[in-house]
Amino acid sequence: QKEVEQNSGPLSVPEGAIASLNCTYSDRGSQSFFWYRQYSGKSPELIMFIYSNGDKEDGRFTAQLNKASQYVSLLIRDSQPSDSATYLCAVGGPGDSTLTFGKGTMLLVSP
Amino acid sequence: DTGVSQDPRHKITKRGQNVTFRCDPISEHNRLYWYRQTLGQGPEFLTYFQNEAQLEKSRLLSDRFSAERPKGSFSTLEIQRTEQGDSAMYLCASRSTGSGYTEAFFGQGTRLTVV
């Protein structure tokens, strides 16, 4: 059984701060890693994906992957109240099949 | 094409009734996924199609659930003899496959309430 673990939160940060979201996964064969943002009552939308160890930056977002530790993180710099949402970590196995999602971490950014 | 479309957006049904949901993927996408999401949980995989072929079903999917994608375009998900535990958001996603990564786009979901 593939598992993806996230702290459910809420993670509270002040506006302008860095928010750090973490995720661990159980399947060492996992090859693709995704961060989705989900506003309440809405469907998930992709923020970033990462395949290789190291960091990947896109605007205010940085994804970090450490396959040896089976750990993925998402950093959000200069957090804004509009970033307040649930952040879902999703992991894909070998090949091109399905994603396993974590339960999500709720982020609250206070003005 | 404005994205993945799901119908209905909301469905309230009595326990024991059958319900059917529809998903229209982005037109050029050959792969279509169904997920279920309950409050406080992440999306849980149910099944997926490559064109009209159903390639994988979750072991969690009971035989009351059936999905089709008859012409490789839209898909339906039917739940027979609904139970209160079936109450959830049912999400459809689609993507194209090929070289390199392609993003899966989610529809707005169908929220099912079984009373």
Image (spheres, coloured by chain):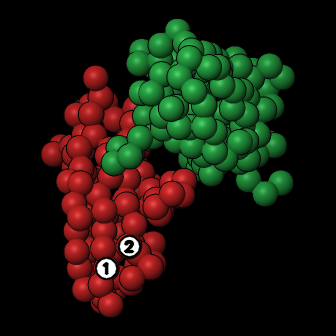
**In the image shown, does A92 or B69 lie closer to the viewer?**
B69
Q: Amino acid at mark 2?
A: Ser
Mark 1 vs 2: CB contact within 8 A = yes
Residue B43 appears in which quarter of the rendering?
top left
Q: Which residue is mark 1?
A: A109
Q: Picture coordinates of residue A74 (x, y %)?
A: 31, 64
Mark 1 crowd level (few <14, some 14–19, many ≥20, 10 Å Cα): some
Seen at 45% across and 40% down, the residue is: B37
Seen at 31% across and 79% down, the residue is: A109
Q: Picture coordinates of residue A15 (x, y %)?
A: 30, 88
Left/right placement of residue B108 relative to residue A101 reads right
Seen at 79% across and 26% down, the residue is: B72
Q: Which residue is mark 2?
A: A84
Element on which disc 2 rests: loop
Q: Picture coordinates of residue B112 (x, y %)?
A: 56, 37
Tell me, by letter, which chain the rendering colours red: A
Q: Chain under label 2?
A: A
Question: Does label 1 or label 2 sit earlier along the sequence?
Answer: 2
Q: Residue furthest left?
A: A69
Tell me, by letter, which chain the rendering colours green: B
Q: Quadrant of the C terminus of chain A?
A: bottom left
**In the image shown, does B3 or B39 lie closer to the viewer?**
B39
Q: Chain under label 1?
A: A
